[in-house]
Image (spheres, helix red, strand yellow):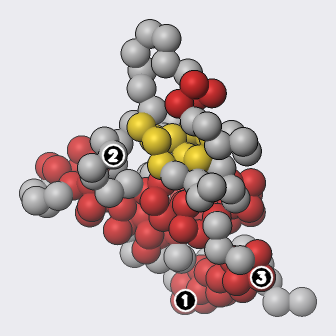
Amino acid sequence: MSPIRIQRRRSPGWTLAGATSNPLGAVIVSRPSRWGNPCKVGLMQEMGYDDPHAAATENFRFWLAGSRSDAPTDEADARRERILADLHELRGKDLACTCPPDKTCHADVLLYRANMPAAELDAWIAVVRARVDRHRIASGDKPLHPAP
């Protein structure tokens, strides 16, 4: 059974356990969680994007892959690092976000990355960390992962 994205509801009686049949369970990845997308759909809407969900998802995809163009801060880098360090915890689990199922969502990015083969995921994370450190050094900041 492949993990899927499910829509988190805030209605009475809705439970995460009741929304998934995945034997490994499910994890809430909506905004207030540690997995939440720092790029707000509402901001993308205010900026005039035709599909603000897609814009926020693309922004998340680039940010998670090491882009610092929209958020060149220590806080954003630390948040990304927390996600990268724990991404393996999402492997095989369904992910729940409040985004409608017919809209693209950052949970789709998390599902893809978390369920990559372990060695491929580790290699991708190493590339992201190196990219972030190169950007940090170029900006005059200390690297998060200095070379040994």
* Secondary element at image label 1: helix
- The mark closer to the camera, 1 or 2, is 2
Query: Disc 2, disc 3: CB below 8 Å?
Result: no
Q: Cα distance, mark 2 to mark 3?
A: 30 Å
Q: Quadrant of residue 24?
A: top right
Residue with the mark numbered 2: 101
Q: Position of residue 139 (x, y in %)?
A: 52, 82
* Secondary element at image label 3: helix
Kind of residue indicated by mark 1 = Ala
Could you tell me which residue is drawn at 54 percent across and 68 percent down? 112
Q: What crowding class fits label 3: few (fewer than 14 Cα within 10 Å), some (14-19), or many (20 or more)?
A: few
Q: What crowding class fits label 2: few (fewer than 14 Cα within 10 Å), some (14-19), or many (20 or more)?
A: few
Q: Cα distance, mark 1 to mark 2?
A: 39 Å
Q: Position of residue 72 (x, y in %)?
A: 48, 69
Residue with the mark numbered 3: 119
Outermost top residue: 12
Could you tell me which residue is drawn at 27 percent across and 49 percent down? 102
Is 75 located above or below residue 132 in the figure? above
Could you tell me which residue is drawn at 65 percent across and 43 percent down? 22
Q: Earlier in the sequence, mark 1 or mark 3?
A: 3
Query: Disc 1, disc 3: CB below 8 Å?
Result: no
Q: Which is more toward the observer, 138 or 52?
A: 52
